[in-house]
């Protein structure tokens, strides 16, 4: 268990610090109301879960979006998010499966509905007071058109033992990095 926690901490920290470098040094970034997310990370009671939802325009949204966090958040395994990830893209080989699992990604099968193992695992993490992030569009929205949001976020909120803090995030420009 300790070995897996070390691998996960290392994966999340390295990827997070790379995201911070990429978004803040190699590119320009303008963030509005960042303090709301930071406050939720640092000041909510440990039993209160956090859910963030955002639009999905690029394969690089996750993890580059988290470059907005401070380095102290990126290296703190307890503060970093769990993210729902497409099983058919992120968990296709043993190497990718380990990388994404150590990066706190939860495999979900698109089209399998909200009552699946990945969603149950996400609810368990929320009920432990953790942060879960998801993209309710359910896939990369390359055309940036209005899409029907998947209702998994509703199940996550409804099945939390404690009412979660829910923060919507909207971002622009990640698709210019990698469409």
Image (cartoon, rainbow, N blue to C red):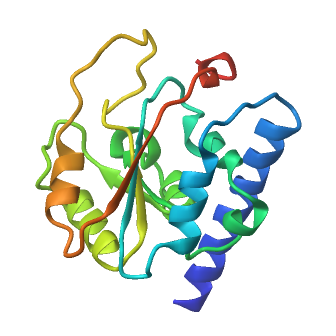
Q: Quadrant of residue 21?
A: top right
Q: Residue 99's x, y, as percent?
A: 57, 58
**Left or right: 72 with respect to 166?**
right
- Compared with 81, 78 (above or below) is below
Q: Quadrant of residue 10?
A: bottom right
Residue lying at 60% horizontally and 74% vertically, measured from the top left: 77
| Residue 118 placement, left or right of 67 | left
Number of marks drawn: 0
Q: Is residue 56 above or below residue 109?
A: above
Q: Residue at x 22, y 57 (%)?
A: 156
List x then y, in percent, for residue 2.
Answer: 58, 90
| Residue 127 on image: x %, y % | 28, 76
Residue projecting furthest to the bottom: 2
Name, please, the residue furthest toward the right. Answer: 25
The answer to whether residue 26 is left or right of residue 144 is right
**Is 136 in front, or is 99?**
136
What percent of the width, then of the height, locates residue 101?
48, 62
Residue 178 visible (yes or no): yes
Tell me the quadrant of the picture where the C terminus can be found. Answer: top right
- Nearest to the observer: residue 45 or residue 178: 45
Residue at 38% x, 38% y is 135
Res. 102 in view: no
- At a point 31% along the width and 30% down the height, the residue shown is 137
Is 35 or 6 nearer to us in this picture? 35
Please tell me in which quadrant of the rendered image residue 144 appears: top left
């Amino acid at each position: 268990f300790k070995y897996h926690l070390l691998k996960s901490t290392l994966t999340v920290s390295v990827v997070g610090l790379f995201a911070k470098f990429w978004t803040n040094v190699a590119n320009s970034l303008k963030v509005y109301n960042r303090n709301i997310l930071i406050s939720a990370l640092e000041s909510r009671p440990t039993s209160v879960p956090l859910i963030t939802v955002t639009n999905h325009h690029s394969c690089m949204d996750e993890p580059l979006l988290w470059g907005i966090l401070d380095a102290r958040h990126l290296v703190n395994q307890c503060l970093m998010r769990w993210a729902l990830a497409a099983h058919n893209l992120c968990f296709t080989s043993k190497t990718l499966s380990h990388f994404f699992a150590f990066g706190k990604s939860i495999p979900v099968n698109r089209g399998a509905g909200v009552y699946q193992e990945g969603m149950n695992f996400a609810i368990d993490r929320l009920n432990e007071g953790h942060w879960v992030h998801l993209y309710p569009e359910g896939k990369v929205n390359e055309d940036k058109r209005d899409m029907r949001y998947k209702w998994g976020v509703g199940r996550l909120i409804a099945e939390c033992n404690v009412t979660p803090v829910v923060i919507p995030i909207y971002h622009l420009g990640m698709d210019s990095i990698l469409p």
